[in-house]
Amino acid sequence: MPSKIQLPPAKSFEEIWAIIQETDRLMKEGAVESDRRFKEIAEQMKESAAEADKRFKETDKLLKENAAEADRRFKEIAEQMAETDKLMKESAAEADRRFKETDKLLKETGRQLGDVHNRLGELVEHIIVPNILQKVKPLGYKFKYVRKRCEFMDRNFRVIAEADIVLINGEYIMIIEVKTVLKVKDVDNHLERLGKIRRDACPPDESHRLIGCVAGAVVDEAVKKYAHKKGFYVLEQSGDTLKLDVPEGFNPKMW
């Protein structure tokens, strides 16, 4: 059998009417509250939109101002770089001009010094040659002949060495190197020159003995001692004449 449904007891008309009125009142109050909340939310949204728009405008203004400032700074930097580039180019051009002037001056100075050096060398030779036989006479070699700017050749007639002044007799040959300012390297070069002449230019049965001598318009005391130590005679200019300095106990080297 189907179950029975027990219905609530019937209410009176007055009670039902009261419930309907209370429900209507509650619905009206709910609608008023919903409308109030809606308006409140709408106002808040409107205020938020206004604030967002305000902030957007402020941000846009700041961005434009920053962009303008950045553009101004960029132009300033570009102008400064252009000015710096101009100055660097001008400086480079000026440096190049001065370098060329200096190079020209150095070349001209070198040429003039070369001319002076050559003239002094010629002057030394002109002072040495006319008096050379008289100056070396006390050495006892009895030289008879004087030669200037001599070339020495090997057995194949190739020039292997040159000498400024050469003194000759039947037994000895004195080979003299002349310098404006005598230096240690000049002594060493002359030492090598004499060895080469003895080795390559003189035949094995050559009876001549080679003697070394260095001469200069200016001869430092230390260089003079060095030359004597290597077995060279030393001639130096003294006023308008020559001075032959032979230290006590000096033993000349023979090749």
Image (cartoon, grey):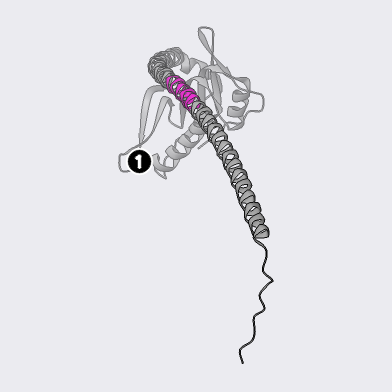
**Secondary structure found at label 1:** loop
How many numbered circles are shown? 1
The verdict on residue 75 being magenta is yes
Residue ID at (61%, 22%): 246
| Quadrant that contains the N terminus | bottom right
Left-right relation of 33 to 116: right
Q: Nearer the viewer, residue 52 or 176?
A: 52
The kind of residue tagged 1 is Asp
Relative to 140, does residue 253 appear above or below in the rendering? below
Taking 139 as reference, is 5 left or right? right
Outermost residue on the bottom side: it is: 1
Reading the image, the residue beneath label 1 is 154
Q: Residue 118 occupies which quadrant of the picture?
A: top left
- Residue 203, image x, y percentages: 39, 43
183 is higher (above) or lower (below) than 201: above
Instruction: Give the percent coordinates (x, y) of residue 89.
Output: 39, 20
Residue toward you, 120 or 234: 120
Q: Residue furthest top?
A: 240
Q: Rate crowding at label 1 as few (under 14), some (14 to 19) or many (20 or more) other CA atoms within 10 Å.
A: some
Toward the left, the furthest residue is: 157
Q: Is residue 13 left or right of residue 111?
A: right
Magenta segment range? 64-80
Residue 152 x/y as whole percent:
37, 34
Q: Main secondary structure of the magenta part?
A: helix
